[in-house]
Amino acid sequence: MTAKTTATKNHSAAKKSARKYSPAAGKMVETEMKAMKKGKLKSGRSGETVTNPKQAIAIGLSEARKAGMKVPPPRA
């Protein structure tokens, strides 16, 4: 095997082990997306129905953070 192939293999193995989001956080986002598609997801203070998928993902990640799951901090 060449050095380049070995380096690529090592990189992909290291990348798999270092997950940004926990699987449980992904489940939380999936739950929020389903609620949005059904029209049941409401936004925080205003209580209006969420129609934007990006907003549903943000709500799911926020709830995962509150629950203490592995999720990176929000972008500024």
Image: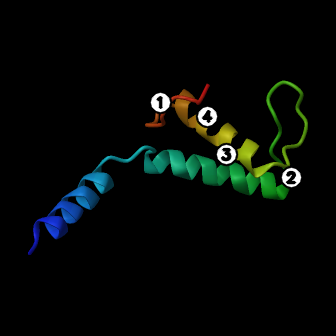
Secondary structure beneath dot 4 equals: helix
Residue occupied by mark 2: 39
User: Label 4 belongs to which residue?
Assistant: 63
Residue 36's disc number = none
Whether residue 27 sits left or right of residue 33 in the image: it is left
> What kind of element bears circle 3?
helix
Q: What amino acid does circle 3 point to? A: Ile
Which percent across, then down, holds residue 63?
Answer: 61, 34
Would you identify the image quadrant in which residue 49 lies? top right
The tag earlier along the polypeptide, 3 or 4, is 3
Query: Alpha carbon of mark 2 to alpha carbon of mark 1: how far?
Result: 27 Å
Q: Position of residue 6 (x, y in %)?
A: 14, 65
Q: Position of residue 41 (x, y in %)?
A: 80, 44
Residue 22 sits in quarter: top left
Q: What amino acid type is highlighted by mark number 1?
A: Gly
Spatial separation of the CA atoms under disc 4 and disc 2? 18 Å
The residue tagged with tag 2: helix, strand or loop?
loop
Q: Secondary structure at mark 1?
A: loop
Amino acid marked by disc 2:
Gly
Residue at mark 3 to residue at mark 4: CA–CA distance: 10 Å
Decide which of tag 1 and tag 4 comes sooner along the chain. 4
Badge number at residue 68: 1
Which tag, 2 or 1, sits closer to the chain's start?
2
